[in-house]
């Protein structure tokens, strides 16, 4: 599952869940989170670890990284 899908389903099941709240859980800004979610930024090692931990490994972090580097020239 990618990060955008995870957030979509989380919001669907928990009306109080927001991008801002998730970003705070990761210790990053909402803008940084948006870039990660859209694939315009690759997570650092620390953020990748936290995404893995917070989502209970539901988000494929390695796939996020791979997609980002495939997009960049």
Image (cartoon, rainbow, N blue to C red):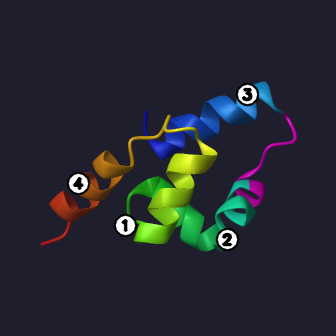
Give the residue at mark 2.
Answer: 27
Q: Residue 55 or 72: which is nearer the viewer? A: 55
Which of the marked residues, 3 or 1, is nearer the chain's N terminus? 3
Do residues under tags 3 and 2 come within 8 Å of each other at their CB atoms? no
Residue at 64 percent of width and 29 percent of height: 9
Q: Report, in whole angstroms, how far the alpha carbon at label 4 lies from the one at label 2.
A: 23 Å
- Which of the two labelled residues, at mark 3 and mark 4, occupies the earlier sequence position? 3
Point out the stretch of residues depicted in magenta.
15-21
Which residue is drawn at the image coordinates 51% and 66% (left, top)? 47
> In the image, what residue occupies the spot 77% across and 49% down?
18
**C-alpha separation, residue under disc 3 versus residue under disc 1:** 25 Å
Relative to residue 63, is residue 47 depicted above or below? below
Q: Earlier in the sequence, mark 4 or mark 2?
A: 2
10 Å crowding of disc 1: few (<14), some (14-19), many (20+)? many
- Where residue 64 appears, as percent x and y from the top left, is 34, 52
Q: Residue furthest top?
A: 13
User: Circle 4 is placed at which residue position?
Assistant: 66
Q: Horizontal placement of 49 versus 23: left or right?
A: left
How many C-alpha atoms fall within 10 Å of the one at disc 4: few (<14), some, or many (≥20)?
few
Whether the residues at callouts 4 and 2 have beta carbons within 8 Å, the answer is no
Between circles 3 and 1, the one closer to the viewer is 1
| Marks 1,4: beta carbons within 8 A | no
Q: In the rendered structure, which disc, 3 or 2, sits on the residue that comes first in sequence?
A: 3
């Amino acid at each position: 599952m990618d990060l955008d899908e995870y957030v979509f389903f989380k919001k669907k099941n928990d009306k109080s869940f927001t991008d801002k709240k998730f970003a705070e859980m990761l210790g990053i800004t909402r803008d940084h989170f948006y870039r990660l979610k859209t694939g315009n930024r690759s997570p650092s090692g620390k953020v990748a670890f936290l995404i893995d931990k917070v989502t209970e490994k539901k988000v494929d972090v390695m796939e996020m990284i791979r997609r980002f580097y495939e997009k960049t020239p």
